[in-house]
Every structure is written in C-alpha cells, then in structure tokens.
Amino acid sequence: MKRLVGIDYGRRRIGIAMTDPMRITVQGQPTLSVAGFDKALAEVKLFLDQHEVDRIVLGLPLNMDGSRGEMAKEVERFGESLEALTGLDVVFWDERLTSEQAKQIIQQRHGTKEKDGVDRVAAGLLLASYLQAHPG
C-alpha cells in the first residue's frame, strides 16, 4: 500500500503531512517555502517524486458558509495542475478551521506562535480527518 499525502496550500508556505505505508499514522513533513504558483508545483512534485504516494489530499479553504472564494479557486487550479503533472489522484478536502486548530495546538504544546509549524500541523489535521472519514 502506498502513502497518502496531505497538503495545506499557501502562496508562501505549503504544509505537508504524510501517512505511513499502512495508512495508520500521520507525520508532518518540513514546510515548503515557495514564491509563486509554478514554484509551488515544482516543489511539491519534487517532494512527491521522493516518496511512494498514490493519492494527494489537498485542503480546500472554503468560506464558512461553504462557498468558494478566490483562494479556494486557486487551490482547485493547483490541484488540477498537480494531478496533470504527477498523474496522482488529488482529492479536495474541506479544511475550514484547520489553521486555527493548528495554531491552538502549537500554542498549547510550545507556548509559541510558530508559523512554519502551523502549516505542517494543519496538513496533518486535514489528512487525519480524511483518514477518519475513509478508513482502510
């Protein structure tokens, strides 16, 4: 069985989390610093090429009312481009409030507001949420 990768897309930072091969645990990966859409695609592809992955769970930042704003549309475009570039399945997953949850977790654990950690933890939260909804 191959791994699942969770991605919290941002214009400057991309949080990544990955399951173990059995898809039991989720581990945060180093946050990618990017400058621009094309650079983000290239950096994520490089990461994916280094691991055995068969599906990407991409956080979709919907508005609180469930509508799609500008950032959600950009994430959808990123996911479609990533799918075309890698040939991997991309699943969009509602990520509302994951960044806020991540900030609270980091604040509780470390007493700090570490920005890189927020992206990584948010990616882990969305991937864990996906795994709970799709066991096995």
Image (cartoon, rainbow, N blue to C red):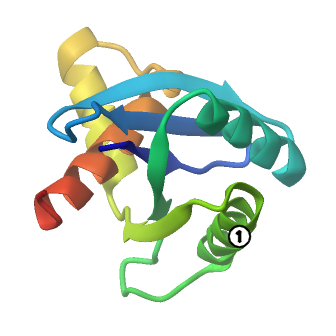
Taking depth in this image into account, of 118 and 29 the one nearest to the observer is 29
Is 53 left or right of 20, judged from the image as shown? Answer: right
Q: At x 65% / y 62%, what residue is drawn?
A: 87
Between 117 and 112, the one lying in front of the other is 117
Q: Residue furthest top?
A: 110
Q: Amino acid at mark 1?
A: Glu
Residue at position x 71%, y 42% in the image: 45
User: The C terminus appears in which quarter of the rendering?
Assistant: bottom left
User: What is the x, y in percent for residue 79?
Assistant: 63, 66
Question: Residue 134 at what x, y percent from top left?
Answer: 17, 65
Q: Position of residue 56 (x, y in %)?
A: 48, 55
Q: Quadrant of the N terminus?
A: top left
* Residue 34 horizontal side relative to residue 5, left or right: right
Up-down: is 94 above or below 98?
Answer: below
Residue 72, horizontal then vertical, whole percent? 59, 73
**Residue at left offset 37%, top offset 62%:** 95
Asked whether, in this view, residue 106 is left or right of residue 79, the answer is: left
- Residue at horizontal 14 percent and vertical 37 percent from the top: 24
Instruction: Identify the residue under disc 1.
Output: 74
Label 1: which secondary element: helix
Image side of residue 33 versus residue 69, left or right: right
Quarter holding residue 74: bottom right
Q: Is residue 80 above or below residue 18?
A: below
**Tally of numbered tags:** 1
Near mark 1 (Cα within 10 A), the count class, few <14, some 14-19 or many ≥20, is some
